[in-house]
Image: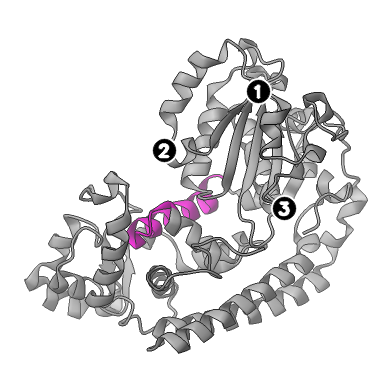
Amino acid sequence: MEAPKGRVQNLSESEQLHLKQVWAHLFQHWGIPVDSGKVLAPGARGSANASFNAGSDNKEDAKPAKKSNKLFGRFRKSSSNSSSSSSSSKADPQDRARNGSFTSRRSAESIEQMYPPGMIHDALKDLKPDEVSENFWDMLRTDYPDNLILRFLRARKWDTDKALGMIAHTLHWRLKESRPDTIIRGGELEAFHNNEKGYIKNIELCKATLHGFDLKGRPVVLVRPKLHHSSDQTEDEMKKYCLLIIEQARMFLKEPVDCATILFDLTGFSMSNMDYAPVQYLISCFEAHYPECLGHLFIHKAPWIFPPIWNIIKNWLDPVVASKIVFTKSTDDLAKYLPKKYIPKYLGGDDDYDYDSYVKPDESVDAKLKDAETRDAILKKRKVIIQSFIDATKRWIESSDTETSSKLLKTKISLSQELTENYRKLDPYIRSRSTYDVNGSLKV
């Protein structure tokens, strides 16, 4: 299967430039020395962004940036460059930078002074470099590192500044707030260990089930709102369940497929099932922290009571997410997107999978979690691959001609494949087995 455009296997020259810029800023934050002069030079920056803006239909991107919050927008120099900071302040480049992102301010003078080597992107300044680096490599799972970053760039219309702000916000969210990596590693059994009754009820009811693939090979999550009642769980338990399902769906993704499909089956839905809080939370997650991870979202068999509910929900949606929502009424409608073998029999398809049966994994399936020796050996190999990837990326950023850059990009893709294979070996030693591992439908 050929990779779609905008992935590391299929990038234009200007898209490569934006990817190099993101890596350059991440490396500077992590303390990895890199000569970023070529990718942050005024000429390169101007030509790349001009080609993007000419084709952009997002009017918001053309507006000057608002004054930055603590995780977004402006830039600062590292402490090692404090002397150069004072000398350059006479030209007042920082004041000019504050009035707009670099994509809306093209002055060669201001850009040149804003981006000397060693400068740290302001979006990253409140995050600890070691924590950010560790979390970035941890959150990959089977993703290619470049393709993970490219999701954020595509979501922000190839605006490097905005993509970095989004990445920083997501890393802060993963590290300090919702901690989805802890949730997926603990898995379903963690809910039982902690006796989180509402969380357990969601799991046992199978409100959301991962089963089958759509016609584009994307994993399908079947959600049945008729099983939901807000009183069954706390808000925190509902959020944990949402993140468990999202992160489990990520486990099903295999290159070049990088998004999932959600089928909201509203069969039997009534007003007693309506709960706006989880809907808002899911929308915010996909828009802010899992960009470009949603293929289609089907709303199937919406009852007559649904239109006023939809009138409220649609106002919360980003236009990109809204464009992926499809209303379906019949089996034939679904069959345009899903093979019949993965459409449940009760919806007129051929799939006789039991969506109401949950089998709790036995504790014995997690025996490998106790094998620290094997885990550490795999992690040691992983560190070597990561270092090789970093070295190749540095050379790629610093490359002076297209041929060298192309060769190094192929090296990076090969190392990404090694990272994916390494994670497949590591996975049973760090992640509790889910019902999907046990029934064989999930093969990492």
Q: Which residue is mark 2?
A: 319
Residue 122 spot, x, y in % from top left: 31, 61
Q: Nearer the viewer, residue 287 or 193?
A: 287
Whether residues under marks 2 and 3 lie with C-beta atoms below 8 angstroms apart, the answer is no
- Residue 158 located left or right of residue 67: right
Q: Is residue 167 visible?
A: no
Nearer-N-terminus badge (1/2): 2
Query: Which of 141/14 is in front?
Result: 14
In 3D space, how far apart are the residues under numbered discs 1 and 3 (Cα atoms)? 27 Å
- The part of the image, by quadrant, that contains residue 383 is bottom right
Query: Where the N terminus falls, by quadrant?
Result: bottom right
Residue drawn at 53 percent across, 54 percent down: 175
**352 lies above or below 166:** above
Relative to 414, 352 lies left or right: right
- Label pair 1/2, CB-CB below 8 angstroms: no
- Quickly name the residue at label 3: 252
Q: Secondary structure at mark 3?
A: loop
Q: Quadrant of the C terminus?
A: bottom right
Question: Is 74 colored magenta in this rendering?
Answer: no
Which residue is the site of mark 1?
A: 329
Question: What residue type is disc 2 on?
Answer: Pro
The answer to whether the residues at label 1 and label 3 have Cβ atoms under 8 Å apart is no
3D distance between C-alphas at marks 1 and 2: 23 Å
Q: The magenta stretch spans which residues?
A: 155-178
Q: CA distance from mark 2 to mark 3?
A: 26 Å
